[in-house]
Amino acid sequence: MAGTENTRFPESGMAPDTAYQLIHDETMLDGNSRLNLATFVGTWMDDAADKLYAESYDKNMIDKDEYPRTAAIEERAWRLIADLWNAPDAKAAIGTSTIGSSEACMLGGLALKRNWQHARRDAGKPADKPNLVMSSAVQVCWEKFCNYWDVEMRLVPLTEEHKVLDGHDLERYVDENTIGVVAIMGVTYTGMYEPVAQIAAALDEIQAKSGLDIPIHVDGASGAMIAPFLQPDLVWDFRLERVHSISTSGHKYGLVYPGVGWVIWRDEQRLPEDLVFRVSYLGGDMPTFALNFSRPGAQILLQYYLFLRLGRAGYTVVQRGAQDVAHFLAKGIQGTGAFDLWNDGSDIPVFAWRLKAGHTSNWNLYHLSERLRMRGWLVPAYPMPDNLGDLTVQRVVVRQGLSMDLARDLLADIVTETASLDALKSPMPMEDVHPTFHH
Ligand SMILES: *Cc1c(COP(=O)(O)O)cnc(C)c1O
């Protein structure tokens, strides 16, 4: 009845208990989210948050007139984030909640494109061939952005020497049609930060030589909620003039259930007025510029709840706990002798490793991933992008909820499975192993 073969819209209904049980039973076969070390997205909140969620899951964020207090809390929340990201004047900043980083990145990209078009038209120059420069390890939302809004995507390839976009040779990628550069705080493939200050310095040099003034959007989907707490002295945010906008996922290291992201511009001038719509709000009007119209308001309340509940000190404790676990696992995995770490979780609590060159030709990381899956763990293996495509890595995302105890169990399983693969006398079948994971 409930299988995928069932494609006919049901003629009649059924009792709520029966429908509930059908869906409940079918989803029992889903994985255990606590053992999913592939995802960045939060899967746990405390009881008070759950209570707040249950009280507010019917609120529609767009109904600002009906839910003026929720609207006020949304604004308060993004202003707090502007402060967290060192906006020079949090009152001059402008921002919004979104459904996640994908929507937030679209808005950041759209503002870059529109600002560039205005400047080009004002200068009497053509504005029909925009391009956006970014690392080849960008998340798929940037490919979507470039595809949906007709922007040429200029990818700077990763290499062994340049493991992230770091500003090298940037002048070969930018020109008068470049609407901006995307810098990623927490590259999805590996968890590494891109050195935003170094990228900004490279763009300063380009401006000094060519006059091109190219802004940066920071995609801080995960790192923008880690760096303020674990690396407060790292300069990556609005302290850099060139950073016009920053986005993050509230549902990743913002620690909220799936369904919230944020994007902030350093001041209102960076968000072109013609992208802003007005909705009625308490008899007056309120600017909106999200892509979605109706969407849940509850997640925004949950984000604000966490800001109050945790504060800087609490977020620091939670994120440091995750980082301690990441360091423990990275060290243990390196200790097996079979692997080389790509990074060790010192940026966001995410790290990747590869098989040591020459270690074995009997098995690869896909086999290890499969074996861990049989033990309940989801630890994806996948190829690195583009010209590093021959390189397979495996990655762990440490989130709140992966306790040190669970991490010890995971490490023990990795050690056992690695030893048993190493004991093979002949190669594992190589044909049918492939990545099951998408960024
Ligand atoms: C996860 C991620 C995104 C997309 O975020 P969603 O909240 O899932 O829409 C974009 N960029 C980076 C770097 C990410 O890690």
Image: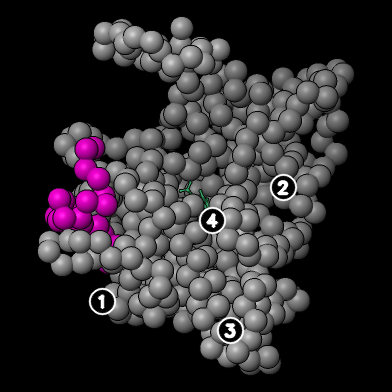
The tag on residue 186 is: 4
Task: Please give the range of residues in magenta.
Answer: 57-79
Q: Earlier in the sequence, mark 1 or mark 4?
A: 1
For the residues carrying marks 1 and 3, which lies nearer the camera in this image? 3
Residue type, mark 4 in image: Gly
* Residue type, label 3: Arg
Which residue corresponds to mark 1?
91
Q: Which mark is drawn over residue 384?
A: 2
Q: Is the residue 325 above or below the residue 19 in the image?
A: below
Task: Find disc 3 in the rendering and name its residue.
Answer: 120
Q: Is residue 108 magenta?
A: no
Question: In the rendered view, does 333 fall on the left or right side of 260?
Answer: right
- The residues tagged by marks 3 and 4 sit, at their Cα atoms, a distance apart of 32 Å
Task: Give the answer, above or below, for where 427 lies relative to 127.
Answer: above
Callout 2: few (<14), some (14-19), or many (20+) C-alpha neighbours within 10 Å? Answer: some
Residue that appears at 44% across and 16% down: 9
